[in-house]
Amino acid sequence: MTRIESYLNDTWQSGREPMIALVNPATEETLAETSTQGLDFTAALAFARDVGGPSLRALGFEGRSTLLEEMSRLLYEQRERLIEISIANGGNTRGDAKFDIDGATGALTYYSRLGSQLGTGNALWDGESEQLARSPRFHGRHLMVPLRGAAVHVGAFNFPAWGTFEKAAVALLAGVPVVSKPATSSCLLTWEMTRILVESGVLPAGSFQLVAGSAGDLLAGLGGQDTLAFTGSADTAARLRAGAGPVRESTRINIEADSLNAALLGPSVETGTTVWDAFIRAVVSEMTQKAGQKCTAIRRIIVPTSQIDNVQEALCAELAEVKVGNPALEEVRMGPLATADQLEDYRAGVASLAEQARIVFGDPTRVDTLGVPAGKGYFAAPVLLRAENALAAHEVHRREVFGPVATLLPYDGSVAEAVEIVARGGGSLVSSVFATDRDFLSSVLPELAPYNGRILAIDPKVAEVATPHGTVLPSVVHGGPGRAGGGEELGGRRGLSFYMQRSGLTGNRALIDKIV
């Protein structure tokens, strides 16, 4: 039995019993156990601030760029071993596992390259210098410097690699030490990745710490120089916002929460075209990749009334080819949900949606599986629903079923109704628009922008080369308004600002210009 330890104060530490079991969601076999009972998180935060911060700032941007490059290299060298762990503990197919792990190393590499352009110091200018008085000597300019606290990262179960290290890449480049708390159920992968980095000796003292298990009182000690970045449910996010740090100390908090993302088909797209094929391919991929357990997955499929029957037929045909089962098998395209609780929520969620939309493909109570013992595993069938009145299907716009589930919604082909349907979701991480009519695209994109953190526009010229709907790029902001959490991560240099203090400097221009 593997005993997972937390990495705190630059030492591996194991908590007291009772232990929490980590299982293979395809077989329900216990893989490892962990606990954080009795661990001193107050000391860990102090170690990050007092040791980790100074050790990172001593490197400057250039040194931290080299650090991220080395971290990415070390993890990529162990990619095959990490993929096997991801398949076993995450219920991922090989493709799903690579998506998560390569997302982690890709983000580290991207921010390493960005850091190489920022110089040797720790400060950045934000904007240009501006004359503030009659004398040209008196100027003002905004300076950004690393906060002197710790970056606490609380991750979700679906991306234990990418979710951990995309957050860490930005904070570390900014010069802020990280205390990472991945979801317990899938933290075997994060733990192994941390072990690779620790054993290599690449991490500066106090720069990266791992909480493998319950967060305990970790968040109770956050102060005004600390930051908290969270990915997970809106309910948990609401509790975190009400914590002592954000409320009393103004601890910065970034939330990525529930999101009812949409795929919108333009009114002039014909069957059999490259844009049509890209649309069908995107919906099926987003429903089945990682068993639909992605914050960016398509939940609402918005289609012109004239095409909805054709779209339904095409989607059902593609979904019928999806083989569900043990993700270790090459022929399996979709693995299980991550936990027994996720399976229960999936079934309850589908039943709720089915009150306002009818199931046109799949059965939430039955799924045929390959390569697993009878009655074992947290497997769910892909389920496609269809609502006849998009604006009246209130539950579809309210409840996210975190699994292989999406709902067809008809619209009249107008920009106004398409936008109204998307907006009913209350704020999304991403929506995709597939269209051949440039006038439709140029009209609908700015109208969708207030309700989305990111919009993917697919026309005939990019239909075969664009990145997929659910791919989060480190150069583009990841987050969204309203129920999506109201936050932003990544976005290239923009991401650094969450971990840095912007300070307005006013004074002698010659003096100010010499600072950076």
Image (cartoon, rainbow, N blue to C red):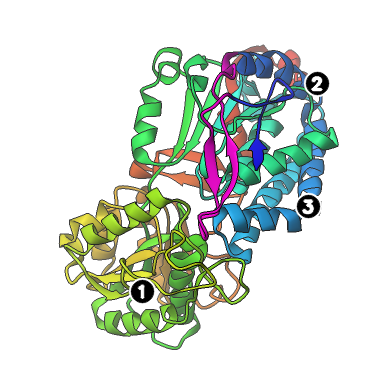
Task: Mark 1: give few (<14), some (14-19) or many (20+) Cα within 10 Å.
Answer: many
What whole-number distance in Å separates the C-alpha atoms at marks 2 and 1? Answer: 53 Å
| Quadrant placement of the C terminus | top right
Percent across and percent down for residue 397 are: 26, 55
What whole-number distance in Å separates the C-alpha atoms at marks 1 and 3? Answer: 43 Å
Give the image quarter of residue 225. Answer: top right
Tag 1 or tag 2, which sits nearer the N-term? 2
Tag 2 or tag 3, which sits nearer the N-term? 2
Magenta span includes 40: yes
Q: Is residue 219 above or below residue 197?
A: above
Which label was assigned to residue 266?
A: 1
What whole-number distance in Å separates the C-alpha atoms at marks 3 and 2? Answer: 29 Å
Per the image, the residue denoted by label 2 is 58
Per the image, the residue denoted by label 3 is 78
Q: Is residue 103 left or right of residue 382?
A: right
Residue at screen point 36% across, 73% down = 265
Residue at screen point 81% across, 26% down = 59
Mark 3 is on which residue type?
Gln
Percent across and percent down for residue 133 are: 57, 14
Q: Is residue 169 above or below residue 474?
A: above
Magenta span includes 279: no
| Quadrant placement of the N terminus | top right
Q: Which residues are magenta?
A: 16-42
Q: Is residue 413 above or below residue 220?
A: below
Camera-side residue of 471 and 116:
471
- Could you tell me if residue 448 is visible in this image? yes
Judged from the image, the secondary structure of the residue bearing numbered disc 2 is loop
Mark 1 is on which residue type?
Gly
Mark whose residue sits in front, 3 or 2: 3
